[in-house]
Image: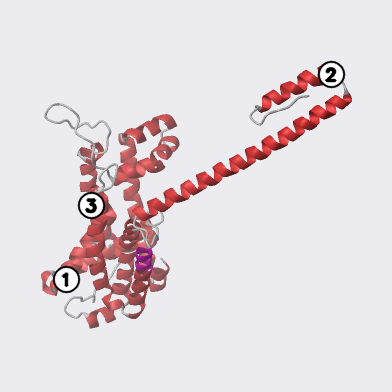
Amino acid sequence: AITFTAGQPINRLFRYIQQYKYSRPSSTFDKIIMAQVDRKLERTHSAAYREGTKEAIERVLASVEATAEKRVKDGFSEVNFTLGVLNCFFILFMFNEYPQHLWIVYIVEALYLFPAKFRFLINAKPLNQAFYYLDFCWVMNIGLLLVFLVLFAGRNHISDEIRHQLFLAGFGTACGPLIGATATLPFVTLVFHHLESMTSVFIHFYPPLLFYILRWKADAVKEAWPNIFDLDYDLVFWPNGSFTGCVFGNTIILYLMWIIPYFFWQLYFGLDLPKTHRTKKLADGSPAPTVYDTVFHANMRNGLCVTIGNVLWKRPKELSLQQVKTNDFEMRDFYFYMGVHLFSGVVSTVVLAYPCFLSKYAHGVV
């Protein structure tokens, strides 16, 4: 008789079949052997299935636990989630019921969110992300906060003409590049418990809300704050004789005031900061340590390098992945990135800000 122990490998079963089936061509014997093999195979498959199911469940549970730990590390709790949801409802309530005071809410929340976000950035791993605050959206929001603080301190601190020009530039920026960035940036998401995500939503969505009120509910704002806001401006969108004094011209000038210094900062300092093997040397001749990250490098690592290399330069994927690994990208990638940034800023001003300028309904939809 032939017996099979539970630990025998499956390939030995087939060797038994070949050995006995053909050496003893007895139909009865064949039936006995095949019956034993069938039972063994059934038990083996069942055990394998149970073992595989157990391993799969354990992997799923481990993944769920890892995700839960990450959520807790990111700040997830019932309190944070509830506060995030309530804050959204509070902003909507203020927008509908007391729009003339919404700019005060912006100041208060920005004074909390901006430093809190910065604390997360400087403690980010593996690279410090403090220089993310040099990106366009952050610079514009910090500038808007400073203008509101100066206005709150007293209307006479800024002349009427400067406030007029700032309003034109702010309207185009808020309703153009800032709101347009939400369509391309993956981190602008409503994650109520996550301070970083909610801050990204705040700096992209809040300014268009504010300028909706300043543009279409100006009377309520002036009545509530007569010593701070004037808003009796002659507003034009396109240049007429002069490039300044209109929404489009002032917005482009403001954009250039950011992108030109940022371009040269990246060119001479920023591009080298996240490199694994930095160009900058210490006094002893060794490469400077890699400490800081930039938004450009983060976007390139997030698939942009591979896409640009494949579509534009026909660069091998392996080479792009090596550049991602070392944070050392080609200059043509950087030039293309900055060119697209500038082009997107101009296009979003025309496509998004112009309809917002023409109609409060279009502004509300955007």
Q: Which residue is mark 3?
A: 258
Above or below, comparing residue 339 to residue 157 in the picture:
above
Residue flagged by tag 3: what amino acid is it? Answer: Trp
Identify which residue, 44 or 261, lies in the foreground: 44
Q: In this rendering, does residue 186 appear at all?
A: no
**Would residue 170 be counted in the magenta stretch?**
no
Above or below, comparing residue 305 to residue 152 in the picture:
above
Label 2 vs label 1: CA separation? 102 Å
The x and y percentages for residue 243 are: 24, 59
Quarter of the image for residue 155 reads bottom left
Seen as rendered, the residue at the extreme right is 27
The x and y percentages for residue 45 are: 68, 37
Quarter placement of the N terminus: top right
Give the mark toward the camera: 2 or 1.
2
The circle on residue 24 is: 2
Quarter of the image for residue 43 reads top right
Quarter of the image for residue 29 reads top right
Q: Earlier in the sequence, mark 2 or mark 1?
A: 2
Q: Earlier in the sequence, mark 3 or mark 2?
A: 2
Above or below, comparing residue 349 to residue 4 in the picture:
below
Q: Secondary structure at mark 3?
A: helix
Label 3 vs label 2: CA separation? 89 Å
Q: In this rendering, does residue 333 appear at all?
A: yes
Label 3 vs label 1: CA separation? 23 Å
Q: Earlier in the sequence, mark 3 or mark 1?
A: 1
**Would residue 84 be counted in the magenta stretch?**
yes
Quarter placement of the C terminus: bottom left
Chain part drawn in magenta = 78-85
